[in-house]
Amino acid sequence: MILKSLEYAKEAVSKDIKDGESWIILGNSYLCQYFTLSQDPAILKHCMSAYGQAYLDPIAKGQPDLYYNKAMTLKYEENYSGALETFKRACDLDPMWMPPDREMIKIKRYLDAAVDLIKTRGKIKNKRLANMLQAVDQKMLGEYAAGAFVTLGGRRDVTLQHVRLDALTEGENENKVILGRVVGSVRSENSVPFTFGMTDESMQCIIVTVYNLAAGRGTLVGDWVAIPEPVLTTHSIDTPEKKYEFKSVRVNNPTVLFVNGRRVDHTQVAGTQVSSTYEMQ
């Protein structure tokens, strides 16, 4: 059904490449595909490209749903500054339409919780935290243990080096694996992504966002989590109320994770549908 909708949307665009409404529908179709059929973040880039084409149509450019749907895409790209700014634009175009305002509130609550989790390390007492991190059991790395050869993203015979969180560099950390303990999670009204805080013997704490994880399958406080080739992002988000700063690692495919030495299997993976429609008042 989703692929058929995408096919129809592409066909509509091909008939009139200047019709902004058709581009909006195509972008929405890609967004639905991302959450129901595929975990490939490249699909979100297709969304942004379609919405970018819609901007070229003066009529479509004035529609708040274009900004709302673009903001949803930015949110799941974890571009929180861009998402807040674009939701605000949707609000300005239609002050009586409440969904964009509600989404901005959700993002700020999420950021508040994420920053608090990192700052307090889940409010775990120092002595308990020290005991949790005292002895790093290499068995918790599972297949990513030193000397093992693994397949990652189609690359075979990859060996990984275990590094501390404070040794990560911005962006991709190829041939590296991190291992830490969960200190808490962030409750989200949407449940996507599943978000938890993780620390290791460096005592640095980062946020980990996991997409397409089935409900009730998240990690628990104290769990060991191994993440191969983490992509580190440093966030700095300015809002009228406050500034948010933290570091995060995004996991698009939960089956690359090892939790307590065991790989997350496909029974723990689930797609998520997202509503991104504009209802006329």
Image: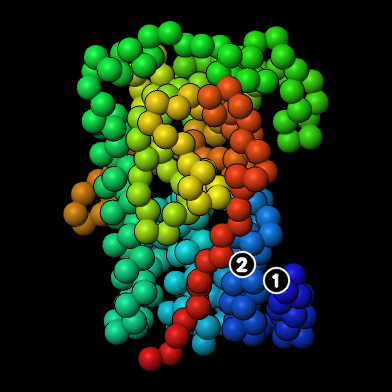
Q: Which residue is mark 2?
A: 32
Residue 135's x, y, as percent? Answer: 43, 8
Are circles 1 and 2 on residues that touch, CB within 8 Å?
yes
In this view, the residue in front, 223 or 111, is 223
> Residue pushed farthest bottom?
281
Residue 224's x, y, as percent? Answer: 48, 24
Residue sitting at 50 percent across and 51 percent down?
215
Dot 1: few (<14), some (14–19), or many (≥20) neighbours within 10 Å?
A: some
Q: Which residue is mark 1?
A: 2
Residue 189's x, y, as percent? Answer: 37, 59
Sequence order check, earlier mark of 1 and 2: 1
Which amino acid, mark 1? Ile
How far apart marks 1 and 2 lie (CA) works out to 7 Å
For numbered disc 1, what is the local secondary structure?
Answer: helix
Count of numbered labels shown in the rendering: 2
Task: Look at the image and name its color scheme.
Answer: rainbow
Residue sitting at 53 percent across and 83 percent down?
60
In this view, the residue in front, 215 or 91, is 215
What quarter of the picture does the C terminus occupy? bottom left
What quarter of the picture does the N terminus occupy? bottom right
Q: Which mark is residue 27?
A: none
Residue sitting at 54 percent across and 75 percent down?
55
Q: Looking at the picture, does residue 233 appear above or below residue 101?
A: above
Residue sitting at 47 percent across and 54 percent down?
192
Q: Looking at the picture, does residue 152 appear above or below residue 138?
A: below
For numbered disc 2, what is the local secondary structure?
Answer: helix
Residue 98 visible in the picture: yes
> Which quadrant of the structure image shows residue 195?
top left
Residue 81 visible in the picture: no
Residue 38's x, y, as percent? Answer: 68, 55
